[in-house]
Each structure stands twice: as C-alpha cells, then as structure tokens.
Image: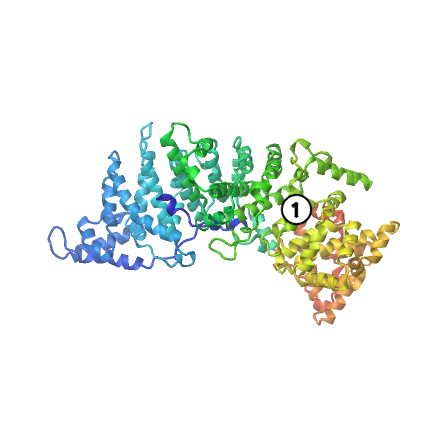
Amino acid sequence: MFFLAVSCSFSASRCRLITSNNSSKPSSSCPNSSVQEEEIMATLLGSESPCTGGKRRNCSSNIVTKFTASKITGQGFSRGTQLPGGLLQERDKRAKWHGIPTLLQKLYESSHPNSDLSHAHSFLKVLSSQLSMEAMSFVTEDRKTAQESTFPNTYTFDLFGGVDLLVEILMRPTLTMQKKKPKMNDDLVKDCLSVLYNCCICTEGVTKSLAARDDFVLFLFTLMTNKKTFLQTATLIEDILGVKKEMIQLEGIPNLSGLVQSFDQQQLANFCRILSVTISEPDVGNDDKHTLLAKNAQQKRNASPSRAEVNQVTLLNIPGFIERLCKLATRKVSEATGANFLQELEDWYTWLDNALVLDALMQMATEEAEQSSTESSDESSLATSPLRHRLPQSMKIVHEIMYKVEVLYVLCVLLMGRQRNQVHKMLAEFRLIPGLNNLFDKLIWRKYTASNHVVHGQNENCDCSPEISFKIQFLRLLQSFSDHHENKYLLLNSQELNELSAISMKANIPEVEALVNTDRSLVCDGKKGLLTRLLTVMKREPPDSSFRFWQARAVESFLRGATSYADQMFLLKRGLLEHILFCIIDSGCTSRDVLQSYFDLLGELMKFNIDAFKRFNKYVNTPEKFQTFLTQINSSLVDSNMLVRCIVLSLDRFESQTEDVKVVEVLSECCLLSYMARVENRLSFLFRLINIINVQTLTQENVSCLNTSLVILMLARRKAKLPFYLNALREKEYAEKYPGCLLNNFHNLLRFWQRHYLNKDKDSTCLENSSCIPFSYWKETVSVLLGSDRTSLCAIASYIDEPFMDLDKDLLED
C-alpha cells in the first residue's frame, strides 16, 4: 500500500525549479484535535476506577495533572497508551478512536527488547491499513480542498504516542551493546516507515518533530543501504529535510561515500531528490527580489562557506559521483511507438505525477522478477520482468524523465557553486554535453507538441508536468554550462567549430582563444550540435510557449562575456535575429519575463556587430514596426535596459569607424542607430534609468539600470560632455519641480556601486567584458562623479543647490 500513499506531487516537489522544498500539508490544526483532547480528559475524569468501581475524580485529577505536566517536563506519562486499557476501551466508541489507542497499547507491549516482533508486526499491519486510507484520500483528493480535510485516525495515532513508538522500534537495534546488531524484518521496517510518512502528510507538526531529532534523521540514512526499504526511507527523509530548520551536514552521515557508491543507478537518481535539499541555499524568497543592500550585509555577517557550499564539496569528494550522474543524465531509453502514444502519455500524467509512485511500481516489477529468477534485479533484469512488459511504454519514458530531472537539477546547482571550474572539467571529461545532444530529438525535445503546454499539479498557473520540468532543467543546465565559460564551445560539433574558424578568417580577425583550446574529442557528435538543435526548436516554439524564456536565456549565455563576432555571425546566419524581432514586434507576446529574455539576447547578438544592425533595419522596415519596437522597449526599462546599453555602446564604436564605408552606410540608414544618436533620446533614457531605482530597492534584477546609466555617462565623459549631461539632469529636476531629487538619488546609488563592485572580482570582470570599457575607467568615472569639490564640473555635488543637498552619509551603514 505504500506506493498509494506516496508524496503529494512531483510538481510540488520540483517547483523549486523556478522553488519550494516543503511538501504540502493539511491545515495548521486538526479540526478534531480539541474534541479528542476533551475526550481524553473525559476518560480520565469520568471513568470508574478498576480498583473500587466508584468514580475516581480525585485520582483522575492527579492523572490529568501528571499527563499535562509530562508534555512539558518529559516526566511521567510519555504516551497515551500508558492509560489503563479499560478506560481506553470504554471511551473508544464514543470518541471514535476506532480502536487505535488499544492497538497501540498492544503494539507497545509486544515490541519490548528481545521480544518476538512478529506479533508487533501484526498489530502494526492493522494500524497501517487504517492510516493508509486517510493518506490515500489526501493524495487522491482535489488538492485545493486537501488542506480542509480531516484525518482523525492519523491524529489519534500521533496523539497516543504512535509516532514516538515507531521511532523507538526502528532505532532499537542501535541501542544494543552487542557487536553484531540484531536485524529487523524488512517488511516491519517498511511498514514503520510507511506509517510515519502517512502521519507526516496528514498531521501537522509530525514532520517538524521528526526533523528536530538529529539522531533519527542520521539513522534513516543507514536504512538506505537496504534496497528493500530504500524507497520508503528516501521518501520520509525527503519530507523531513524539507522542513528541517537547519540544513543537514552531509559529512555527518556515517560512511556517506560508501553509502552512495553502494547505490544502483535507480537509487542514486532518487537520492538526488534528497541531495537537492542539502546543496541548495535555503529558499528565503525570490533571489532577484532580495535587495543587494540586504544581501551584501548578510554576506558580510556570514563570511564562512554556507552549509550548502560545504555539502557541495562533500559530494564532489565522493569518488565517481559526478561520473555516475553524467551516465544517468545521458542514459538512453527505448523509443515509444504507436498512434495512441500522446493520449496514453497524458492519461498517465493525470495519475502518475510522482516519481516515487513510478518507483513503487517498478519495485513491484523487480520483486516479481526476483520471485521467478535468482538473477540480480539490476536494470537489465528489470527490463525482462513480466510486469515491466505490461507497463505502458509511456510510463517507462516518464519514469526515466523523472530520474533525469533530479540529476540535472543537482548538476545545475553544482555548476553554479564555488567549485564551478572543477565541476566543469568533470562534466566535459565525462561527455555530458554530447550525451545530452544524442538524447535531444528522441527524449528531451521529441517532435510532438501536444503536451508541452499542458498545466499539471496543484498550481494551475505552474507548468510543472514531468515533461515540462525536464525541458526547463535541461535549459537551465545549458545556461549554467555556457555562461562565461570557455567550455561553451562543447555545445557545437566539429563542423560547426570549423564554421566559426572560417567566419573569423573571412573577417580577418583572430580566433578566440577558447575556441582554439577546445578539445575536439569532447564536442558533440552527429550532424548538429546541441546549440543548433536548440535554435531549431526555439524558432518553432508557438507564441504561448512556456519555454521561450528559458530557451532565450540558454542561447544568451552562449554569447555572454567578451563579445565574439564569429559567435554572433554563427547565430545570425541561422535567422536568430529575425526570430527575436518577430517575437518582440509581431507575435503579440505580452509576458514581461519572455520579453526581457529576448531583449537581453538581442543585445548580446547585436553588440558591436554592424551586420546585425543592417539586418535589424531590413526587418524593421516601416515606421509602424519601429514604433512598436520602441513601445516595447519603453514599456519597461528594467527589462530592456541591457538592449539600450548595447545600442549606446555600438553607436559609440561605429562613430569611431567612419573610414569604413559599410559602417557609414548603416549609420546613415539604420533607424535604431539614428534614434539613439539624438542626444535628447539618450538623455530621456538616462533620466528614467536613474529615476526607477534607489539604493533601498536595488536587486540583482534591476542593478543593470544603474550600470547602463553609468555607460551613458562614461561615453559622454570620453567626449568631454559629462558636464552637459549632469546639467541636463539638474534642469530636468527643476522642470519636474523636484530639485535635488534625481541627483541626490544618483549620488547615493554611485556610493553603493563603489562598495558593491570594488569587492567583487566576478562582477567587475563581467562589466568590463560586456562593455569593452576597462574596469579602471568605470572606477575612475564613479570617483569623479562622487568628487566633493563643488567647483568641479564633473562632480554631481556641483549641480545640487545647497538648500537641496541631501547626500545621506548613513544610508549605506550597516
């Protein structure tokens, strides 16, 4: 029955994609709790004494006092089953306890040390059947009403000490002084774990109380060595770690390396569900929405590595760990055939939305195979199991997809950690990218589209079906893999690398060093590399696709860093610019996230590339199209400012290349360059960029607005026009009747910029690479703007009249 009461939904557990780790729970208190507590009190106060036959109010009053005090002091009564059996039986029917307290009492009496646990197991089976029905109702009910459901049997079980009793039974072998620990029956262990999990999902507080017991949490990991109890143990651990206040330290798990190395591939994939909770930073809100001021202060307080970072190092030190994950991620699965495949897949989605449900069925197949054969139940023997043959092909594919989601998530987190270069080296060595390329058409992006946009799971606004989660995790992995790293060229095949070399040669520019150093034995195989395959499906994606944002982010990451003309031309030749412009201008797209991702991608694609601006002008060939494009840009500068920065930087470079006839021609004809060449338009962008942010609201998402405003002013300073721009800001303030407001805000923003960037090597490198402006010039310009000499025409302070001077000295103090 365990697989019927397994965790609530795949979509809920993996919504941290985009991510909470906590399982769904019923309401914070059981509606029947006060009633049941009153029943207990009534039992104690109103029942006849077994000794005298009379009413024992004085005696029972002492029992109530002791019972209440025991919950506080831990002395006296430790569980409800210590009450006299006669009292429990008398009140059972009226209180609707369904015999649970009595069964618990029998379970306790039959589970003493050195006793025959077969009797205890029989009582536990009866209890399990009662509790599993409630767990089943929680899993199968409409999730919107699940929190309003009541689970009286589970609550009664916990109230009378059932949870504590099962923990004691499970941990009893660890308490013996004997060298050879007594072994418990596997079925008993499985039932104990299943009942505990049912209590976790149906009764508020059980999971948290178990999570508070570090000894029990660490003990659970030792149960994972037994394949027969692995699934039940993994499910319970995942639920417990999701609510644990402090992240567990993996190095504290006894013999972790040996444990992981003992797992077969199926177990390792499920273990990744647990690992994802231990290597991800605690989810305290959307990372982009946290202010940089608060994050900097937190980093200053917590200078040492976090537990998540320590856990990542622990995993990387396990021999063969990354190699096995790469094999899991790239493992092939048999292809589905038949006209009814799509409908069959959708039918399975409606029920099998949890990886562990699938695993439970696969475990049944394994056990059936074991009964008919003495061979080991690895993947090969599982494939020959009669039950496995009876399972739909689509179910086998979804099963593999769910495994890969977990594995890709762990790899993605490791790629974004402090050991990024070490992880990169191993992923390249174990050919992760070529392996994913071989799976692209057959598994990752199969050629049907019917289920790509089906909404599943608890949140109707969240596309979190296994298929969709798999695609998003794949795209996030590509984004992390390519971002500012020379290994990005592994996304191409040998022919495509040769094409990049030919582009550089034709343009008479040197090949980038990363391309020259790429190990050709580690690149993609076949007719197309992974990047080219991604571009193909990206251009076919319908306007309402859930994947446009992630696809654009993945491709943009390939272009980020030092601008490469060859990389840009490679993508321009494949029609990427026209596709992006169609999406922005003609597709009717209204999603701000998607538009932002396309603006950012367009900026990287066009930066310093005269051919890209020529192509832009060819597509945007009417005033109406250009006005639509400008309207999209102006609708949210937070989303489009990176594109604005690209246009400003490109214009500045092209204006210095007037000896090139092609450049002069494009400068005179391109509507976009002509628009940005007008100083009033650059000033308009500058006003708004400074006005939409302040130090208290700066986040990782909008800090780019500050850097774009700085780019405009740095280029003005190069041409000795900085005083003109600062005076224009002053005039704008007075025109708006807010003298000092804009410039005081900008002054504070620049002070924050100094403290934020001068201590961050990575960020400073990114600024330099993306703008082709030395970081020393960034620092120098900011220092000039912040100068205290009010006679300097390049200092902000010179443009703020004394009565309106409000340069807050304490704004940035902790």
Circle 1 residue = 536
Q: Position of residue 611 (x, y in %)?
A: 79, 50
Q: Please indicate, yes or no, whether residue 798 appears anywhere in the rendered image.
A: no
Left or right of residue 376: residue 642: right
Disc 1 crowd, CA 10 A, few/some/many (<14, 14-19, 20+): some
Quadrant (top left/top right/bottom left/bottom right) for the C terminus: bottom right
Position above or below: 460 against 429:
below
Instruction: Tell me the residue at 24%/46% (across/down).
Output: 103
Q: Position of residue 807 (x, y in %)?
A: 68, 62
Quadrant (top left/top right/bottom left/bottom right) for the N terminus: top left
Q: How many marks?
A: 1
Instruction: Tell me the residue at 36%/31% (across/down).
Output: 371
Left or right of residue 358: residue 813: right
Q: Position of residue 600 (x, y in %)?
A: 68, 53
Left or right of residue 460: residue 526: right
Q: Amino acid at mark 1?
A: Thr
Q: Position of residue 676 (x, y in %)?
A: 78, 59
Identify the element where label 1 is drawn: helix
Instruction: Tell me the residue at 84%/51% (across/down).
Output: 663
